[in-house]
Amino acid sequence: MKNNANLWRSGYGGAAPVRVAIGSDHAGFEMKEILKEYVKSLGHAVEDFGAPSSDPVDYPDIGYKVAREVASGRFDRGILICGTGIGMSIVANKVPGVRAALVGDTETARLAREHNDANILALGARVVRPEYVRDIVRVFLETSFAGGRHARRVEKIALGEAGKGK
Ligand code: RB5
């Protein structure tokens, strides 16, 4: 219940369409195919950066591609899927301008957007509850950054990336 309880709280509300870059390794391939169609059905644009099948690939190869696309501004959000989501989130967070969040519930998805202005959602296909994953994606894509005090904190992340953090 808790997972769905906050779907309709502040920040969520069928926001404007976003451009989504999606990618996975072999472990996340099946979930990527399902989520691609789901994201389209919500009215958002989605581009697939691989993997092209469930043949083994190395998650950094796909993770860096999607992360760079998001950091470049060509896409508003990214979705990266591997077995646990951990490898993809580690990779994505090495690209300046990316704030990747490893999420397994809708409340964390909402807070990752509202508080952290996360621009990449990392999912663990082998661990996330399948009945929650569509809602997690929808909340992540359609929740706005809250700004205010959170903007100052996110700016400090960027300062740290530039070697000017405290
Ligand atoms: C692949 O077996 C697995 O290691 C990968 O999908 C991911 O979970 C790494 O973090």
Image: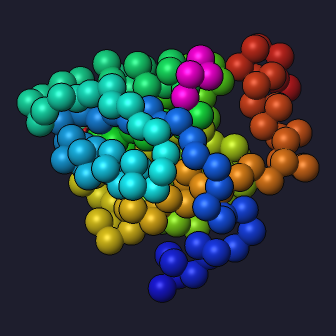
Q: Between 125 and 13, which is closer to the camera in this rendering?
A: 13
- Residue drawn where x is 84% and y is 48% of the image: 147
Q: Residue at x 74, y 68 (%)?
A: 10
- Residue found at x 69% / y 43%: 117
Question: Is residue 29 found left or right of 23 in the rendered image?
Answer: left
Main secondary structure along the magenta-highlighted residues: loop
Q: Which residues make up the magenta segment? A: 71-75
What percent of the width, then of the height, locates residue 114? Answer: 72, 54
Tell me: 158 left or right of 61.
Answer: right
Q: Nearer the viewer, residue 19 or 88?
A: 19
Quarter of the rendered structure image containing ligand 1: top left
Q: Is residue 88 visible?
A: no
- Is 70 within the magenta? no
Seen in the picture, residue 67 relative to 76 is either above or below; the reply is above
Residue 85 rendering spot, x and y as whole percentages: 37, 44
At x 9% / y 30%, what residue is drawn? Answer: 55
Position of 44 relative to 138 (above/below): above
